[in-house]
Amino acid sequence: MSAEHIYRLLLRAYPPDFRAEYGREMVLLFRDQCRDGDVRTLAFWVRVFGDVARSAPALRMEAWRRESANTQTVEVIMKIAGILTVLLAAFGSVSAVGEWVVASRGAMDGSYVLAVVLGVFASVLLLGAGVAILFGARWGRQPARVALFASLAMAVAARLLFPWMSIFSQLVGFGLPVALLIALYWPRTPATVRSA
Amino acid sequence: MVSQQEGAIVRKGKTGRPPEAYLPLPPATFHILLALADGELHGYAIMKGVEARSEGSVRLGPGTLYGSLKRLLEAGLVEERGERADPGRGDERRRYYRLTQLGLSVVRAEARRLDAMVRAARRKKLIGERPA
């Protein structure tokens, strides 16, 4: 296998768009390096691999960020997430209230009541976050973040008080706010471009 | 060898930004712009120019060089000047790059910034009065 063949394989580490734009130039430059350097030395290959290891992940990350910075796509995804959140939170609120009503007919443990109350509040906050995401593409982000953090804290407290919480409730109580927070904190537009 | 991962460099967008808004430049980017201040160059000539000027302390590989060039093109600091063969390096056609007016202003601003820092270091007697 020739040095150039190895380098062509290494080029696959770069994003496809970057490869399409600069792949040929990079191979030409590598050919020049081979001509002027000694490809049989370890130092040569350490430099080659070092360059790929340093630049390819940064360019991949940039390409990925640019892709996810496509606001139209992101906003559509956030709208869908908002609708899903509202539906799940509404269902969670109704089921938590229902559980409270059913439980109130029998003997009720104090910590259980508190867990159910926390669950109701967590669902209501989640509902609020969903509405904020749905109706406030820009202004709604900060209130949604606050509501999600509060909802998550309440869901954690409810789980500690009531360890038999269902898997579904845990997924909605923990998974959904965490996923939405990641989406809300994810940078939308690359403000700076970094050196590879 | 100077780290190529250093700091944020150029902000995106081509219009309405003073050259100082692009500073500070990381060493690799500054060296690339400095190399292009000599005129139109292709990738390998830039790489060799940077290596020679930095006395081997900055060695750009193809990925680092073209990654930086891509960002500089996007920021409008550098522009492409088409493809042609380099008589000294065979028949293959190579892409040539050159500084834009904005790129020239930015590299000048960065040179001034570095110069001011060196003068400050001299005043503090951290380095000699005159360069060796």
Image (spheres, rainbow, N blue to C red):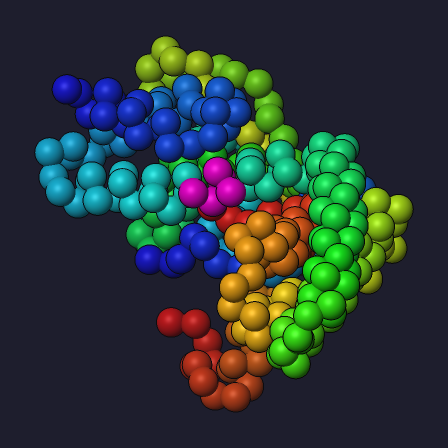
Q: Residue drawn at (13%, 42%), measured in percent from left and top? A: A42
Asked if residue A176 lies in the magenta stretch, the reply is no
What residue span does the magenta drawing correspond to?
A57-61
Give the x, y percent position of residue A150.
Answer: 71, 69
Q: Residue furthest top?
A: B91
Give the x, y percent position of residue A118.
Answer: 70, 70
Q: Residue drawn at (38%, 17%), measured in percent from left and top? A: B87
Give the x, y percent position of residue A110.
Answer: 65, 81
Location of residue B70 by image quarter: top right
Q: Is residue B55 left or right of residue A89?
A: left
Q: In this view, does A182 lie to the left or right of A86?
A: left
Q: Which of A190 and A93 is in front in this view?
A: A93
Q: How many marks?
A: 0
Q: Residue drawn at (48%, 88%), measured in percent from left and top? A: B125
Q: Residue drawn at (36%, 27%), measured in percent from left and top? A: A12
Against A94, residue A153 (above or below) is: below
Visible in this render: residue B89?
yes
Q: Nearer the viewer, residue B89 or A145?
A: A145
Asked if residue A58 lies in the magenta stretch, the reply is yes
